[in-house]
Image: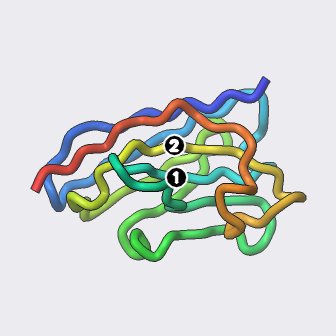
Amino acid sequence: QVRLVESGGGLVQAGESLLLSCAASGLDVSNYNIGWFRQAAGKGREYVAAVGPNPPNIYYGDSVKGRFTVSIDRAKNSVYLQMNSLQSEDTAIYYCASGSPIVASVNFGAGGYDFWGQGTQVTVSS
């Protein structure tokens, strides 16, 4: 059974950094699209970043380009989201999700993802 577990969220001040982790079981992260999404209170779900085995291999949402970096540790079967220069607007629950690279590319959006983690809260104070 596919399971995704996010960790690494917390409370930070504006300008600081956090590293989020998505630990996967039941699938090899190298063979699937792994996406990061976030949802702020009162807002809709936002596509943040993704990595996948087929071109285009990397996706970043416009709001995080140049600040966030997605990466894979194949030995740990985990995907990470390095978040730098955090701002209050980044406050949200962050989710990772997996999807078939056959069905969709990493830039397809939330509809291309089937399994979701429980989320981890990121709060940025200004």
Q: In this view, does 69 lie above or below 10?
A: below
Q: Which residue is drawn at 87% across and 58% down?
A: 103
Q: Residue at x 70, y 38 (%)?
A: 115
Q: Quadrant of residue 96?
A: top right
The x, y position of residue 97, in whole percent, is 64, 44
Q: In which quarter of the image is the C terminus?
A: bottom left
Q: CA–CA distance between discs 2 and 1?
A: 5 Å
Q: Residue at x 53, y 70 (%)?
A: 60
The x, y position of residue 85, in whole percent, is 25, 64
Q: In which quarter of the image is residue 117?
A: top right
For label 1, the SS is strand
56 or 124: nearer the eye? 124
114 or 8: nearer the eye? 114
Graded by Cα atoms within 10 Å as few (under 14), some (14 to 19) or many (20 or more), the crowding at tag 1 reads many
**Residue beneath disc 1:** 37
Whether residue 5 sits left or right of residue 98 in the image: it is: left
What residue occupies the far top of the structure in this picture?
1
Q: Which residue is drawn at 68% across and 27% down?
A: 3
Which mark is first along the chain, 1 or 2?
A: 1
Whether residue 67 sits left or right of residue 77 in the image: it is: left
Q: Quadrant of the N terminus?
A: top right
**Residue beneath disc 2:** 95
Q: Which amino acid is tagged 1?
A: Phe
Q: Which amino acid is tagged 2?
A: Tyr
Q: In this view, does 32 lie above or below 14?
A: above
81 or 105: nearer the eye? 105
What residue occupies the far right of the structure in this picture?
102
The x, y position of residue 25, in whole percent, is 70, 28
Do the residues bearing badges 2 and 1 touch, measured as CB atoms within 8 Å? yes
